[in-house]
Amino acid sequence: MSAPRPRTLRTALLAVAGICFMTGLAFASVPLYRLFCQATGLNGTTGRGETAPGGVHRQVEIAFDANTSPKLPWRFVPEREHETVEIGARDMAFFTATNRGAQATTGTATYNVTPAVAGKYFTKIQCFCFTQQTLKPGETQRMPVIFYVDPKILTDPDTRDVQTITLSYTFYPVDSGKTSG
C-alpha cells in the first residue's frame, strides 16, 4: 500500500474539523439563540436588568396574559388584566397560580411580549419565570414580576407609537425524568 497523499489527508482533516465544528454549533445553538433574542428583542423576548433608569413622564399600557398547558393541573391568572405604567419607572405585577391536582407539580413559565418589536425595551428585574415553581396539591401562590419599559422605546421609529404592550406567560410541566414502568 502506498502512503496517503497530502491532499487526501488534508481533505480528511478538514472534513473531521467541519464535523466537530457543526456538532459544537448544534449544542451551542439554543443558548446562542436565547442570547441573541434577549439582545435584540427578537420574537418578543424580553431583557433582564438590575435597576430601572427612572420615569420619563410618559405612560404605556401593559396588558397581562396567562396560559397553562393542558398537561399541568394549574389555574394561572394575572391579578390585573392591564395597568398603565410610567416608561422608565420600576413597576410590579402579580400572577396567581393554584395547583388543582392531587399531587405536587412543578412548572416552568415561558414568556413573550407583543408587539414583538417592543420586546427589547421590556426589561424584567425579577420574575417567577426565571426559576421553576413547585406547588403542593391545592396550594395557591402569588407570583410577582418586577419590570420596566426602557425609555429608548420612545426614540425607536418602529416602537415610538406603541400604546399597549402585552406580557404573556405560559406555564408548562417540568419533566421529572421519571419513566413509567
Image (tube, helix red, strand yellow):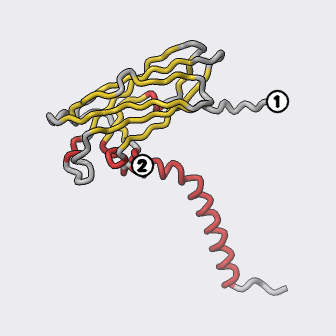
| Kind of element beneath mark 2 | helix
Residue 43 is marked as: 2
Dividing the image into 4 quarters, which one contains the N terminus?
bottom right
Question: Residue at image x 50%, y 30%?
Answer: 131
Q: As displayed, is residue 127 above or below residue 30?
A: above
Question: Residue at image x 65%, y 72%?
Answer: 15
- Judged left or right of residue 53, residue 123 is right
Q: Are marks 2 and 1 in contact (CB under 8 Å)?
A: no
Circle 1 Cα neighbour tier, 10 Å, few/some/many (<14 / 14–19 / ≥20): few
Q: Quadrant of residue 45?
A: top left
- Judged left or right of residue 143, residue 90 is left
What residue is disc 1 on? 181
Question: Residue at image x 41%, y 32%?
Answer: 65
Q: Residue furthest top?
A: 138
- Judged left or right of residue 175, residue 126 is left
Question: Residue at image x 17%, y 36%?
Answer: 58
Q: Foreground residue, 96 or 174?
A: 96
| Tag 2: amino acid | Asn
- Distance (Cα) linking label 2 and label 1: 39 Å
Residue 125 is marked as: none
Q: Nearer the viewer, mark 2 or mark 1?
A: 2
| Tag 1: amino acid | Gly
